[in-house]
Image: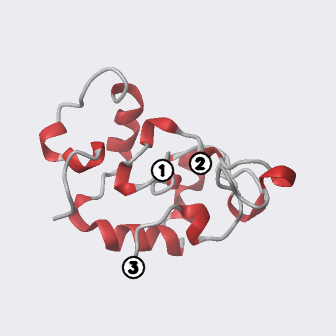
Amino acid sequence: MEKINCWDYMRCGRGLDGSRTGTQGICPAATFAPFNRVNSGSAAGRVCWAVDNTLCSGKASGHFSKKLEKCIRCVFYKEVLEQEGDRILLTIDLLKLIDTRVNSRPSGYARWPYVYGEAGDP
């Protein structure tokens, strides 16, 4: 299956150019730049589970730590997990990117060049 962002997979219409943004707003995953290109997604489109207040089920989902249990049962999360396999970053590694991505490479950079869009698919 093609790698697509959560708002396209779930057809919620809450991506940047989505059909429901005028009435329901843009999902925070669609604008969260620190995760841009992670798992080949736009913004946090393929790591939505690590972003606060994503608009799952039509309402803000709260802090990621409180929603994670629900997210790991989500069909989209399972799809990303299957597609990325052992290349998937753990949530703790995603959170480290928030602090390090703009100014420097994390210590494990050599292990994850695909996170930065600098390696092709294996």
Callout 1 secondary element = loop
Q: Quadrant of residue 100?
A: top left
Q: Are marks 3 and 2 in contact (CB under 8 Å)?
A: no
Secondary element type, mark 2: helix
Q: Amino acid at mark 2?
A: Ala
Write the residue at 26% across / 68% down: 85
Q: Which residue has dot 2 on it?
A: 30
* Number of numbered discs overlaid on the protein picture: 3
Q: State which tag comes first along the sequence, 2 or 1.
A: 2
Q: Which residue is mark 3?
A: 1
> Mark on residue 34?
none
Q: Position of residue 65 (x, y in %)?
A: 53, 47
Look at label 1 and name its amino acid: Ser
- Helix, strand or loop at disc 3? loop
Color theme of the render? secondary structure
Horizontally, residue 86 falls left or right of residue 61, namely left
What residue did someone put label 1 on? 42
Do we see residue 66 in this rendering?
yes
Image x and y of residue 71, in percent: 54, 63
Kind of residue sitting beneath label 3:
Met
Location of the C terminus (image quadrant): bottom left
Residue farthest toward the top in the current orientation of the protein: 103
The image position of residue 3, as x and y in percent, is 41, 68
